[in-house]
Image (spheres, rainbow, N blue to C red):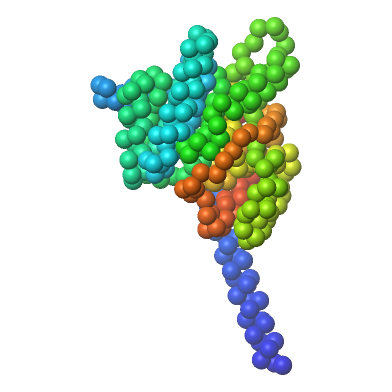
Amino acid sequence: MASLWSLMEVLIYLFLVAACGLLSAIIFEANRRRLNHSHVEAPAVFEDPNTLTQVSCPSIFDPAEKYISLVIPAYNEEQRLPGALQETIDYLQERAAKDKSFSYEVVIVDDGSIDGTKRVGREFSKKFSVDNVRVILLGRNHGKGEAIRKGMLHSRGELLLMLDADGATKVNDLEKLENQIHAFAKKESSGSSFRVSDIPVAAFGSRAHLEEKALATRKMYRNFLMKGFHLVVLLTAGPGIRDTQCGFKMFTRSAARKLFTNIRLKRWCFDVEIVYLCKRFHIPMVEISVNWSEIPGSKVNPLSIPNMLWELALMSMGYRTGMWRVHT
C-alpha cells in the first residue's frame, strides 16, 4: 500500500512538473510574440518578371488602387496552383470585360516553397502583367497565416479576398461575399455616396452546411478531433462563426487594416484570431455558405491538431493577460 502511494506521489509530481513546464513555455512564447506584428513596416518589393526590376510594394495604409485583391498563400503548390490560378484569372478577366470599372490583382505569396511554385507564379505574372498578378517571396516557410498577412498588408484593393491555392472553393462564390459586404456597407453609410473600403466589414465563407455529410463520410477519429477542436475554438474566440477554418474570407480595406496589423498567429489558427479581433474591434461578421469540394493534397493532417491547440493556447494567454496589445 505504501509503495502504491509512493507511485502516485511520483506521478502527481511528474504531472505538476510537466504542467508547470508547459505553462512556462506558453508564457515565454506568448511574451516573445507580443511585438510580432512590428515587422509589417519592413519594406517589401515585387520583381517585374519582364524587366527583372524591383517594383515598389504598396501598403495597406495607402489609398486603394484596385477594386479587389485576391491573396493566395502557396506552399509547395506547383501541381495544384496552375489550374486554380487559371480559373481565377479567367473569371476576373470575364468580369473586367463586362464592367470597365472592375479592376483586380492576384497576389501570390510563396511561403518558402521548395518546388516550382515560385516559377509558376512568375510565369503567370509575366503572362498577365505584374499589375494584375504579383508574387511575394517570403524566403522561408512561416505558415499560412503569415503568408496571408503579408499579402493583405501589401494589397491594393478596396475589397480583399483570401482563398486557397487548391481551388477548393469556386472563385465566383466571391460574389456572395461581395454582395453581402456591399449590402451591409450601404446600410451603415451615412450618405448616398460612400466608399465600401472605408466601412469595416468581414464576410466569411462557410462549409457548415456540409457538416452533416462530412460527419457521415469522415473517419470516426477525425470527427472526434474536429468536434474537440471546435469546442476549444468556442472557448477561445466565443460563438458567432460556425466554420472558422474555411479559407475563403473577404474584408473591406479598413477592416483588413485593423486586423492584419495585429495578427500574431502564423499558422492554421490565425483564422480563429481573426474572429477574435473582429469582436475586439466590433467589426461586423457575416457567414455565407459557399460551394466547396475536397481537393487531394491537403496540408492538414492529425499532427496539425497539436500545433493548432498550441497556437490557441498562445492566443488565449496573450490576449487574456494583456501581453498582446491590440493596436488601433
Q: Position of residue 132 (x, y in %)?
A: 41, 20
> Relative to 180, does residue 292 appear above or below in the rendering?
below
Q: Residue at x 55, y 32 (%)?
A: 170
Q: Which of 285 and 273 is in front in this view?
A: 285
In the image: residue 237, left or right of residue 308: right
Q: Where is residue 289 in the image (x, y as percent from the top left)?
A: 67, 34
Which residue is outermost to the top?
Answer: 192
Q: Is residue 91 visible?
A: yes
| Residue 179 figure quarter | top right
Q: Residue at x 33, y 44 (%)?
A: 115
Q: Where is residue 7 in the image (x, y as percent from the top left)?
A: 64, 85
Q: Position of residue 222 (x, y in %)?
A: 62, 57
In the image: residue 259, left or right of residue 188: left
Q: Can residue 64 be seen in this view?
A: no
Q: Nearer the viewer, residue 286 or 6?
A: 286
Q: Which of 226 and 295 is in front in this view?
A: 295
Q: Which residue is drawn at 65% across and 37% down?
A: 206
Quarter that holds the N terminus:
bottom right
| Residue 20 figure quarter | bottom right
> Relative to 114, does residue 37 appear above or below in the rendering?
above
In the image: residue 294, left or right of residue 239: left
Quarter that holds the C terminus:
top right
> Relative to 122, does residue 304 appear above or below in the rendering?
below
Q: Which residue is drawn at 49% across and 17% down?
A: 94
- How many numbered circles does the render carry? 0
